[in-house]
Amino acid sequence: MSFREPITIRLRIRLTEQRMFVCSIPNVSQIFSGASMRIIICLLVVAMSIPATMAAANPSFNPSADSPADLESRRKALKDMLNERWEYTMRTNPIYASILGDKRYNDKVDDFSQKAIDADLEQSRRDLARFEAVDTTGFPEQEALNKQLMVRDLQISLEGARFKPWEMPVNQGSGIHIDAPQLVSILSFENIKDYEDYITRLKLLPILFDQTIEQMRKGMAERLMPPKILLEKVVTQSNGIATTSPEQSPFMHPFEKFPDAISEADRKRLRDAGLTAVKDSITPAYVKFTAFVRNEYAPKGRAEPGAWSLPDGAAWYTFRVKESTTTNLSPEAIHQLGLDQVKEIEAKMLDVLHQLGFKDMKSFKATVDADPKLHAQSREQILDLYRKYEDQMYARLPQLFGRLPKSKLVVMPVEEYREKEASDAAYMDGTPDGSRPGHIMVNTGDYAKRTLLDLETTAYHEGVPGHHMQISIAQELPELPLFRQHEDYTAYIEGWALYAERLGKEVGYYQDPYSYYGHLQDDMLRAIRLVVDTGFHYKRWTRQQVVDYFHDHSTLDEITVQSETDRYMAWPAQALGYKIGQLEILKLRQYSKDQLGAKFNLRGFHDEVLSGGALPMDVLSTRIHEWVAQQKMQAAVADSGERATPVGSGKQSQ
C-alpha cells in the first residue's frame, strides 16, 4: 500500500541494528575495570542520538515543545476519537454489531438508502480530517499505529467510493438474500428480549430488500452489473427461500429450541409471532426480490466475466488489488508471480505422485475419481474428520505458540439452502465475550462427489492454527482498540491461514501421503488464483480459459473448479490476498531466522506476528524487523552479562 507513515520509535530495549553493533563491546571481560567508561560513553551516544532518530522518523518531532500534560491530552483525544468512531460504526451497522455480539441494536437493520450512504461518506471525510490532524509525537508505538491504521482505513474506504460498490450489492456468494438467513446461526438466543428483537428485525427486513433493489436499479442504469451467469444463480437461491413454506423457513430455526428459562406460554407466543413475521414480511420480500432479479436484473447482467468490462473497470480492479493485497504490486506482476508459484508447487505435487506410483496428475485424478475410499461416505464423516483434525492440532499448539486462544471452536454444516454455491468450508468469528464460539461451516452437500484429500489442510486453515487462532487472539488483546481487534486485511488474515496450513507438516501431521498431496493441492489452488483472477479481470480471459487452467494444473474435483471460477468473477482481487500474504509471512520468517541464527524462536516469531492484530503487509514487515532488532539487542545484553565479572563478587584485584 502506498500510504506509509513513520512509526514512532520503540523506546523499550531497542536501537537500530547499526547502533547496536557500533555499541557492542568486544572485550567484555574488562567491563568492570578499565573499560567501564566505554560503556558510559556508548550509552551517552545512544541517548544523544534518540532525538535525531525521532526527528528522522517524524519530521514534526520537537523534543522541547511537548509537556507531559500536553502529551497525555493528545493521547486521550486520540483514544476518545477511536471510541467515537467505533460507536458510530456499531450504530450505523446494527447487523455487524449483532454479529460481534453487541446486542444494543438487535432490533434494527442497516440503512442502505442513498441518503444514508452519502451521509456515511461525509462522516468518513470529517473523521479522516480529524484523525489526520492528531499529532502523535511522543506517543507509544502502538498508539501512533492506531492513528496510522485508522487513517489508512478511511482513505481506502473513500478512495473506493468513486466506484460505487453499493450499486452491485448481490451475487451468488453474498447479498441480502443469502446473508440474512445466515444470521440465524450467528445470533445468540438467550432470553425473551433476544427473540423479540429478532422478530422486530424480521419485520424490518423488507425495507432493506427494497433499498437493495433501489441500488441495483441504479447499477443497471450506470451499467454496473455482475455477470449474468452469476445472477441466474441468485434467482435460484432467492426462489428457494421464497417457495419454502413459512413453517420450514430457515428464519424459523431459532423457534425450534428455546432456553429452559423461557416458559411454555412465552415459547408459544414467540413462535406464533415469528411465524407471522415470516408469513407477512419475509416470504413476500423474497417473492418480490426473486421476481425483480429474474425478470429485470439478471437479463441485463454483463456478458463478460472480467471487471475490465465495467465502466472504469480497469481502475477499479487496480484499486481492488491494492485493497486486497495491501501492496503496490501490479496485476501483471501478480500474474507472473502466480505462474512461477504454479511451476514450483507442481514439481512438489509430482514428487508425491511418483512416490504413490503415479506418473502424472491425469492418471492420479482418474484413480481418485474412481476410488470410493477417497470420497466421503456421508455428511457426518466429513464433519467428524474436521473435528478429528482440529483436536489433534490443538494438542500441538504449545509447540508453536506462547499465546493460545481462549475462545472455543465448533464444526457445523453449511445450511442446505446455500450448499450449491458455498465454498468447501468457511470460518465464522466467535464473539469477543465468548458467548458464541467460532464456527467452521463445512459444506457437506453432494458428499459422494467430494474427495477427502484436502480436509486436513482445510481444517488447519479455517480452525487452528489458522483463522480461529488468529482472529480469536486479536479479539482477546485488550491493549488494542476495538477497531484493530476486528481489522479485516485480506492479505494478513488469509495469508496467515494459508501459512498455518504448512505448520501441520512441521508438527508431524499429513502422515497420509494422499492428505499431504491434498495440502499441496490447496497451496496450488491459491497459486492458481493469482493467475486466473488477473486472467479474468486484467488479461480478459474467458470463463472457459479459467476452467481449462484449473484442469491443466490441478486435480481438484469439478464442484470446486466451478464454484472457485464463479467466485473470482463475483469478487475481483479478493482471492489474491491468500498467496501474497502467505509469501510475505514466509519471507519475514526466513529473514528472522537468517538474522537471529540459533537465537531464533519460532514461538516468539508467531506470537509477534499475531499480537498486533491484523496488519497491512508493510506494517507487519516493519513490526517483524523491529522485533528482530530487539531480539538481537537482548541477546547481546545477555551475552555480555554472562561474560562479565559481577560487581561485588568479592574477588580482589591482582
Image (spheres, rainbow, N blue to C red):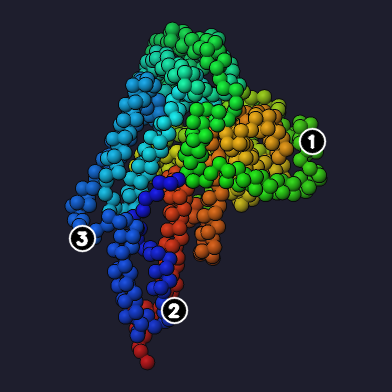
x 79%, y 35%: residue: 367
Classify 10 Å Cα crowding around label 3: few (below 14), some (14-19), many (20 and above): few
Residue type at mark 1: give it: Thr
Q: Secondary structure at mark 1?
A: helix
Mark 3 = which residue? 64
Classify 10 Å Cα crowding around label 2: few (below 14), some (14-19), many (20 and above): few
Which dot, 3 or 1, sits closer to the camera? Answer: 3
Please say if 195 is above or below 396. Answer: above
> Does label 3 or label 1 sit earlier along the sequence?
3
Where residue 367 is drawn, which disc sits there?
1
x 35%, y 85%: residue: 34
Q: Position of residue 295 (x, y in %)?
A: 54, 10
x 41%, y 31%: residue: 162
Q: Nearer the viewer, residue 472 or 181?
A: 181
**Horizontally, is 139 left or right of 476 in the view?**
left
Task: Tell me the distance, in whole angstroms, between the alpha carbons under discs 3 and 2.
Answer: 36 Å
Please say if 394 is above or below 273. Answer: below
**Horizontally, is 374 left or right of 612 in the view?**
right
